[in-house]
Amino acid sequence: MTSMSDFDKLGDDGSNTGVVIKSKPKTKKPSHYKVLMLNDDYTPMEFVVHVLERFFHKNRDEATSIMLHVHRRGVGVCGIFTYEVAETKVAQVMDFARRHQHPLQCILEKA
């Protein structure tokens, strides 16, 4: 005689069957990083505005506002990006500033 617990394990045809449950892998959202611009006493304000327009796609008003914030507070956020994009932006800004002989500094920080 078959017990009730044995029936729980058997399929309709009497065979041993089970249900395969496929779990979805949880995808983790990528970390974001702030690109920060640091103030210095040598880089012209107009150059900083140009950098913000060119590399961070800010309009003139946004770029001017960020530049003034950096000038007054010593540091300002240019944008928030995934690590690879933030790293590329920092490299582009630093390279562009060096080519134009300005000591402008950009860094990234986890958001």
Image (tube, rainbow, N blue to C red):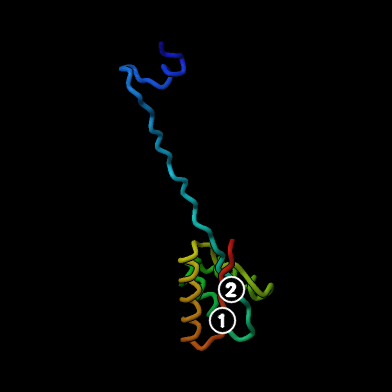
Query: What residue type is disc 2 on?
Result: Met
Residue farthest top in this picture? 1
Residue beneath the point at 35% across and 24% down: 16
- In terms of secondary structure, where does tag 2 sit? strand
**Which of the numbered marks, if any, corresponds to residue 104?**
1
Q: As rendered, which of 48 and 28 lies closer to the eye? A: 28
Q: Which residue is mark 2?
A: 37
Q: Position of residue 89 (x, y in %)?
A: 48, 71
Q: Quadrant of the C terminus?
A: bottom right
Left or right of 20, for residue 72: right
Q: Splitting the image into 4 quarters, where does residue 42 fall? A: bottom right
The answer to whether marks 1 and 2 mark residues whose Cβ atoms lie closer than 8 Å is yes
Q: Residue at x 35, y 26 (%)?
A: 17
Q: Is residue 65 above or below residue 11?
A: below
The total of numbered circles placed on residues is 2
Q: Residue at x 50, y 79 (%)?
A: 94
Q: Residue furthest front?
A: 1
Question: Disc 1 residue type?
Answer: Leu
Front position in the image: 80 or 21: 21
Could you say where residue 61 lies in the image, as x and y percent from the top left? 55, 67
Which structural element holds mark 1? loop
- For disc 1, the neighbor class at 10 Å (few under 14, some 14 to 19, many from 20) is many
Examine the image and state in which quarter residue 25 appears. Answer: top left
Instruction: Please report whichever mark, 1 or 2, sits nearer to the chain's N-terminal start.
Output: 2
Q: Quadrant of the N terminus?
A: top left
Determine the CA span between mark 1 and mark 2: 8 Å
Residue nearest the viewer, comparing 20 with 75? 20
